[in-house]
Image (spheres, rainbow, N blue to C red):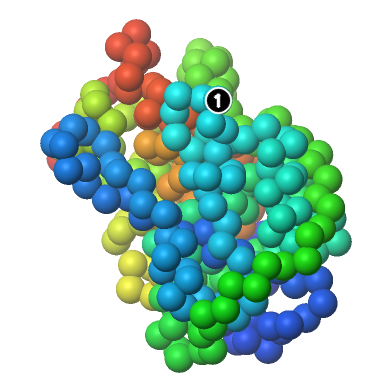
């Protein structure tokens, strides 16, 4: 598929409106909200978007519970990739089977939808797209909104893990030592510089570059919530120092914004991309792992 074929990666609101109810189409809302903690500690409180989904959603959509169904609760860190059997069972409950066509969206710039897209990809499922503009665009265009919560017909999802798409701390250290991979921080420029430190130690993994998922410098337009054109996405990655053909490992605080940056990179034609699953939630907590700050430009 040519790298500029956005239709392979993104579904427009026009397309989805015309295809609601198609046999085999499954629409998943993936919303999670990160809000400031009320105890003054670093990090964020996780708030499910289920109530927002229940109050109004794309007709026929199912709520995909990332913190509940799609995270490994045996791990101390949040949002870690679940075991294959857990993921397959959740997808089956959502009505996603091996022959399904999936459209994903959320209410937060599509980074949570991109996380589920990346998990699907990592488990060998490629017939999934993001709703470009997500809920913001859908609701803003006064598209149909439903409040029903009818459970979908269960399906059989076969997980076929592709471990090279998920990076570990050891993979990142090996990449740093080899010098043949590019580490990409998908957090904001202020977080990358170290002006703020929501994950503990300030700054970024030593030697990494910054391509934010969100904000004015990000891969998603902050006004429309749609992804930038692939030419502009490539320009932003290359301007940051990513060379075509290099292996890329994206990271953030917990693998969510990193998934959106990784999605954008794949859409723009960067072929060898992985997401550091534990990201700074793991890295910044270990003082033996190298981090650095950078001055404001």
| Residue 258 position in % (x across, y down) | 47, 43
Residue at left 61%, top 66%? Answer: 62
Q: Which residue lies furthest to the top in this view?
A: 288
Q: In which quarter of the image is the N terminus?
A: bottom right
Q: Is residue 61 left or right of residue 213?
A: right
Q: Position of residue 280 (x, y in %)?
A: 37, 29
Vertical placement of residue 92 versus 41, above or below: below
Q: Count the labels in the image.
A: 1
Image position, residue 215 (x, y; %): 31, 58
On the question of residue 233 being in view, the answer is no
- The quarter of the picture where residue 122 lies is top right
Q: Which of 176 and 75 is in front in this view?
A: 75
The kind of secondary structure element at disc 1 is: loop
- Does the rendering let one see residue 49? yes
Relative to 270, does residue 283 appear above or below in the rendering? Answer: above
- Residue at which label 1 appears: 74
Q: Which image quadrant is residue 190 in?
A: top left
For image coordinates 72% across by 67% down, the residue present is 152
Residue 162 placement, left or right of 64: right
Name which residue lies at 74% across and 62% down.
95
Mark 1, other Cα within 10 Å: few <14 / some 14–19 / many ≥20 = few
Taking the spot 49% from the left edge, 54% from the top edge, the residue there is 112
- Quarter of the picture containing the C terminus is top left
Q: Position of residue 187 (x, y in %)?
A: 34, 44
């Amino acid at each position: 598929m040519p790298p500029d074929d956005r239709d392979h990666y993104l579904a427009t609101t026009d397309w989805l409106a015309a295809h609601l109810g198609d046999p085999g189409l499954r629409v998943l809302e993936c919303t999670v909200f990160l809000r400031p903690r009320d105890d003054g500690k670093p990090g964020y409180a996780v708030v499910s978007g289920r109530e927002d989904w229940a109050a109004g959603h794309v007709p026929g959509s199912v709520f995909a519970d990332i913190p509940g169904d799609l995270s490994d609760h045996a791990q101390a860190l949040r949002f870690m990739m679940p075991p294959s059997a857990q993921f397959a069972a959740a997808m089956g409950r959502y009505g996603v089977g091996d022959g399904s066509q999936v459209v994903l969206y959320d209410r937060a710039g599509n980074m949570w939808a991109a996380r589920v897209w990346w998990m699907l990809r990592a488990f060998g499922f490629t017939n999934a797209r993001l709703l470009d503009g997500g809920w913001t665009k859908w609701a803003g265009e006064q598209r149909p909104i439903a409040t029903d919560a009818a459970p979908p017909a269960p399906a059989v999802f076969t997980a076929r893990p592709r471990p090279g798409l998920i990076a570990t701390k050891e993979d990142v250290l090996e990449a740093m030592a080899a010098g043949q991979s590019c580490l990409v921080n998908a957090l904001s420029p202020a977080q990358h510089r170290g002006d703020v430190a929501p994950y503990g130690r300030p700054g970024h993994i030593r030697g990494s570059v910054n391509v934010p998922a969100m904000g004015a410098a990000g891969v998603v337009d902050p006004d429309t919530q749609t992804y930038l054109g692939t030419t502009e996405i490539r320009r932003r990655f290359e301007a940051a120092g990513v060379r075509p053909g290099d292996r890329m490992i994206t990271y953030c605080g917990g693998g969510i914004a990193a998934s959106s940056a990784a999605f954008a990179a794949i859409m723009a034609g960067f072929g060898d991309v992985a997401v550091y699953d534990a990201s700074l939630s793991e890295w910044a907590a270990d003082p033996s792992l190298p981090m650095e700050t950078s001055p404001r430009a």
